[in-house]
Amino acid sequence: NKTIVVTGCCSGIGADFAKLARQAGARVIGMDRNDPTLSLDGFVKVDLGDVASIDAAVAQLPERIDALANIAGVPGTAPLDLVARVNYLGLRHLVQAVLPRMPQGGSVVNVASILGAEWPARLELHRELGQTTSFSEGAQWLRDHPVPEATSYQYFKEALIVWTLTQSQAIFMQHGVRMNCVAPGPVFTPILGDFVQMLGEERVQKDAHRMKRPAFSDEVAPVIGFLCSDASRWVSGINLPVDGGLASTYY
Ligand code: NAI
């Protein structure tokens, strides 16, 4: 059976994915800043915005990790620095720390967002940021290239997509591990209200008119499951929208 590490396992999409993976027979080790209320096979408390906390947490993980589902995230209503650390710099650091424990055929899934869809507009910037090789180097680059506070969430989801796409081949060649993104549209979870605050009522209404309803998190979890499973063993370096077709209406 596969051992799957799930960040953000205490709420929303992460909680639903952890449940689904266990039902499918995986051994699920959760990671979150909060204590879990659901049953897991293991749990490590961590602040994914803090390098020392991530390193201490990784030291407690099993020797072999077949899949890493990076689902934890904070909304853009959080301070920019926190969005940068949790949604991007810390996630990258965790991937790099876990990779040596992953066997050939392993899989990393990063949860981005439909709100990162405009990454081609800033491709060069995101490429440059993606080439920084550590948390602290990335943080320094961000001090030199300030990001607008109002769109910090979008910026770091874009950066995550570009990092995933540009790093996946090297990771596949070096470790035999696949790395992909999923990009959900609106999902009924505790942070949905923050998106209304972030984007404004008008944009949210516009999106709402283009689709029937937000997703339920158990409509996103199986897609993460597919990308963690051997059924997707030849899928690497993609960003898969899970949005009921919403992103396609932008074109
Ligand atoms: P949620 O708020 O229900 O769950 C997020 C989880 O991440 C929580 O358990 C929280 O404790 C954990 N977390 C946050 N900061 C942390 C930190 N510093 N250290 C450790 N754990 C931390 O949110 P939801 O909706 O389930 O979000 C999951 C992912 O999906 C996020 O990356 C989010 O950006 C993304 N997403 C969500 C959408 C939505 O409409 N809900 C839409 C598109 C993407």
Image (spheres, grey):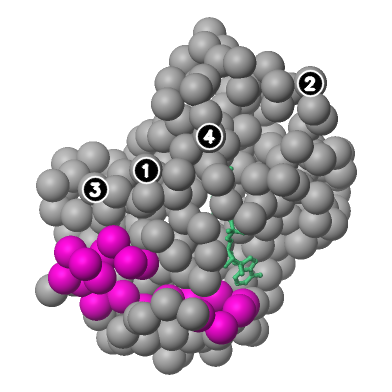
Mark 4 or mark 2: which comes first in sequence? 2
How dense is the environment of label 1, judged by Cα within 10 Å: few (below 14), some, or many (20 and up)? some
The picture quadrant for ligand 1 comes to: bottom right
How dense is the environment of label 3, judged by Cα within 10 Å: few (below 14), some, or many (20 and up)? few
Residue depicted at 36% across the width and 81% down the height: 39
User: What's the CA distance linking mark 2 and mark 3?
Assistant: 34 Å
- In the depicted view, which residue is nearer to us: 201 or 103? 201
Residue 112: percent from left, percent from top: 53, 44
Seen in the image, is 94 located left or right of residue 148?
left
Say which amino acid is labelled 3.
Phe
Residue 80: percent from left, percent from top: 82, 53
Is the CB of mark 4 within 8 Å of ligand 1?
A: yes
Residue 116: percent from left, percent from top: 60, 34
Asked if one can make out residue 103 in the rendered structure from this viewpoint, the answer is no
Q: Are marks 2 and 1 in contact (CB under 8 Å)?
A: no
Q: Are marks 3 and 4 in contact (CB under 8 Å)?
A: no
Q: Secondary structure at mark 3?
A: helix
